[in-house]
Amino acid sequence: MADLLSRRAFLKLSGTTAAALAVGSFIPPQVAQAARDANLLDANNDGYIPSMCEMCVWRCGLLARVKNGRVVKLEGNPENYHSKGKLCPRGQSGLMNTYDPDRVLTPLIRVGQRGEGKFRKASWEEALDLTANQMLEIKKKYGPEAMIFSSTHNLSQPLFENLLYAFGSPNYGTQRSLCFNAMIVSNLMTYGMQEPDRIYDDKLKYILLTGRNLLEAISTSETSALSQAIDRGAKVVYLDPRFTKTAAKAAEWLPIKPGTDLAFHLALLNVIIGEGLYNHDFVAQHTVGFEELQKEVSKYPPEWAAPLTGIPAETITRIAHEFAAAAPYALAHNGWRTSNFVNSFHTQRAIGILNALVGNWNVIMVASAGEGSGPLGAPKQPPYPRSSAIRLDGIPWKYPLVPMNIGVFQELRDNIVKGDPYTPHGWFISRQNPAMSLPDRNQTFQALGKMDFIVTVDIIMNDTAWFSDVVLPEASYLERYDPLNIINDRAYLRQPVIEPQGEGRSALWIYKQLGERLGLGDFFQYKDDEDYLRQQLAPLGVSLEEVKKKGYAELPKTEAAGFSWNTPSGKIELYSDTLAKVGFPGVPIWEAPPAPGENEFYLLTGKVAQQSQFGSQNNLYLHKYSDEPRLWMNAKTARGLGMQTGDWVEVTSKVGAVHIKLLATEAIRPDCVFMTPGYGHLSKGLKIAYGLGANDSVLHVTYTDPISGGQALSQTFVTVKKV
């Protein structure tokens, strides 16, 4: 057997002659020969192939080590901006998602009662025909709006949206309202973009993190950049009611009271504006609304914020001075979820404004290239049919500022249960698990129970698939193509590195096949996955074969956005007239959060480095190295209640109750408890995850921010007792 190509040799060849050729249903002999000729795969189909991870939305570049046609190792690709040669624990374990013994490898049709777990195998033709017929029957009886479509943010989203919009349904649910709606809408109102990029170069001196647990909620490149900035001496101040791994690496941890992040940041603005510590030239030239902001924040001195937050006034004042002194090399990270209260939109606005006041634009913060097609091509298609039905999630009639492709998922679910303003009858779900992710799981089961038909596209039998009528098996991210992913000035390729197992198929294939059966073939004008990618690449004048070699295509260089913002004024809007016109405060104001009652605790949740939300608990590698899911409680509080580590406890909110083991620790405020999300699976099709731990969604009460539509996860209060 020829010597395998080393990783270093692969990188040397990647820009010239190495060819990482992809597979379709199998590796044809001529493709394998071409790969061998390129010294990437040898005679046994062994070597390295570049692609992209999908263990989270960061989509790091990876190098798949293939041996005898099987993936044996995943490594970070140095040629990818998001991985820079690294993969997090989840990324390295991704091959076990592909080789999960519980994978769904053939279409399934339910034959028992919903939730009973009785399915029969079916051909793709039968499963797709059944799905299309059911969808068309619902459309004929009740209108296209009676079909709900929901999906987690992913690269095949444009094709998913083609399916739902071409079908004529306005009802679209994404996970974003459960995570970072407050951040997105705030940034849109302040900067005119969803999320600016952050620069962690050697000039960065000061970083303020508000609940952004970057060392556990890993975004590989940004997490690495933060660690390197700390090593260089940048000061990190971290606000969180819980002592996380990020808190352990910070120079200063502030165990702030939940829901009062807003008060803290309003007080910072009070000091910086009141003492004239802001960048006067930048504010004068590049912002609007300073006078309105100045008038409002004058109400919020540190002495006012101290009893609310639990942080001394002198500490707040000192941090304001330090932050301003470090400017413009100071960054207030606006995170994704901050404190998860209904006032989180104002918190996000205050953080965005804080950055603007110190003039760090084009120094530490820059305009993001964002996502989208950019200079890429796309298959031709007709315009979507107009929908006369209003959306069930309240956009735009109730939530006028929330982008339509983001939505308010929990409101959609609640209105399904209410049947208001109309009753849906079908639900198409792809790469999503609402039975685990939405708050108040009992309410979600009521919504599922109202459906005449449910179809789920996934690689495993997750909890939602367990309650579905048809399950369509998608190929894993190591077995399929997806549309290209633009990061900065490159379009990265996800390509299959091994043969698909069983009958798994790409989303590109599934949506096209289903679209044609629904009479929507004009919205899927590509022959196959590779043809779709060739149409994307056509404007670049580069072939798919060339892109396979390196794993990416270079995009035309574009000029930096400079001091330009996509807001109505063309400037950073400290005061937003857009907000004011729809009846919301134009500047951030204090809104007092609710507090737990006697013998109640704030329920906190958050990410851990070893798991990806609620979709990886059946991964054998991650399971092996993950801590047992337990309820964190302050050790002194636990002693006072007669509890200790290892005790079984009952946690109860006003919508549900769970049993879980206790972890008594000093690493959390006395008024809080914490649960790791993603556990408590009900699907018996997941042999590792089934019954492991407890599900926080059982406890979460649905509270929605009226401005951004974000779910206020931490606004749930619970009692805890020993059982």
Image: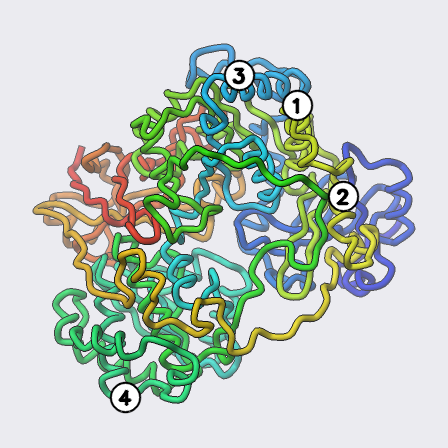
Image quarter where the N terminus lies is top right
x 8%, y 47%: residue: 598
Amino acid at the residue labelled 1: Arg
- Gap in angstroms between the C-alphas marked 4 and 1: 65 Å
Amino acid type of the residue tagged 2 in the rendering: Lys
Q: Is residue 431 above or below residue 297?
A: above
> What separation in Å lies between label 2 and label 3 (alpha carbons)?
48 Å
Q: Nearer the viewer, mark 3 or mark 4?
A: 3
Separation of residues labelled 3 and 4 (CA atoms) = 66 Å
Disc on the earlier residue, 1 or 2: 2
Q: Residues within 10 Å of mark 3 (few under 14, many from 20)?
A: few
Q: At numbered mark 4, what does the secondary structure look like: helix, strand or loop?
A: loop
- Which mark is nearer the camera, 1 or 2? 1
On screen, residue 279 versus residue 317, left or right, reads right
Residue 75 seen in this snapshot:
no
Please provide percent x and percent y for residue 471: 55, 24
Between the residue at mark 4 and the residue at mark 2, the CA separation in whole angstroms equals 63 Å
Q: Is residue 454 left or right of residue 555?
A: left
Residue labelled with disc 1:
517
Which residue is identified by label 3? 137
